[in-house]
Image (spheres, grey):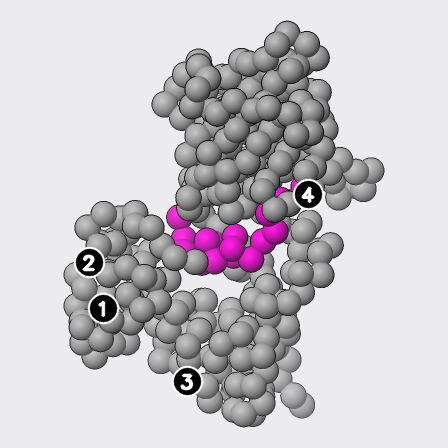
Amino acid sequence: MAELRPPVDALGEALHFLRMSGTFYCRSELTAPWGLDLPATEGSLMFHVVTTGQCWLEVDGVEPRLLQPGTFALVPHGAGHRLAHERGGPARKLEELSEELVSERYSILRHGGGGAPTTLICGAVRLDHPAARHLMSLLPGIILVEPSNSPRMDWLQSTLRFMAAEAQELRPGGETVITRLADVLVVQALREWMAQDTQAKSGWLGALQDPDVGRALALIHREPTRPWTVASLASSVAMSRSAFSARFTQRVGEPPMHYLARWRMYVAHSALKDERPGLGELATRMGYQSEAAFSRAFKRFMGVSPGAVRKTGSPTLRA
């Protein structure tokens, strides 16, 4: 009898790498006519929730979208964008407007001409894991989760109302609550997009959903320092070496060992930020015979030396 393999949720496991930290949150109380020009936030994503009124969201190269109460809008790439009461309307740069700083990471912005009101909750959320930035690079310029009559969406709307209430009152611990709610909402927005958009069925995201390639990816993600070979990965998914290598390369876009090496560099990057180990120790952990070989591989994949990451903890990474 063939061995029964339990199902693996490789895509769900990949979403665990979306370790986010709240960079800044703002409640915007706006009256028509108004427009906001928001700067780019490298290494971050931004979200907007309309609690009252409506507005237009404009990102260069993307069709403008109308946001209404209950809509959760995600701008995944950290791109600069505009919010305005009318499509194509003039917008003031955010840094030109005065804000009421409620705390170090939370403010209230009041702006506009005294007409029809719109209230927004906005957030800039930093992505801590390089794999999360890779995931974000695969997403469209805007992701919207619209209000719906679907029972699946009831809890989402409840979460949005909870976030709006916390932003209105900002009781002790309110920032922490909003940050955690933002984590949930971002992941849910990605799940909704993946369920509906054919783009999510191709490339790395599609590979994660492939029964065999997804299982191999999950094994690499769980145990990146294990001495994997193409043969051992193929055996783990009950495929021949040649068939597995061809299928993995076709679905993921790179050969298994190249992907493994790159993923190890993601893991090494996180270790350098969080643990600050010695480079020799980390090289050995990642399976390299010398610190020099590890450093060359790290710079080739990450675009920056491991020493720079260890020193600063927050370099600019290439996608």
Report how far apart the C-alphas of labels 3 and 4 lie in the structure: 45 Å
**Mark 3 = which residue?**
229
Q: Which residue: 59% across, 63% down?
A: 205
Residue type pointed to by label 3: Thr
Residue toward you, 93 or 250: 93
**Mark 4 = which residue?**
63
Image disc number at residue 295: 1
Of circles 1 and 3, which is in front? 1
**Range drawn in magenta:** 128-144
Report how far apart the C-alphas of labels 2 and 4 lie in the structure: 42 Å
Image disc number at residue 136: none
Asked whether the viewer can see residue 225, the reply is yes
Report how far apart the C-alphas of labels 1 and 3 lie in the structure: 22 Å
Quadrant position of residue 166: top right
Say few, some or many: other residues with alpha carbon within 10 Å of mark 4 (under 14 / 14 to 19 / 20 or more): few
Picture layout, residue 100 above or below residue 163: above
- Percent x, y of residue 179: 49, 34
Q: Which residue: 51% across, 47% down?
A: 77
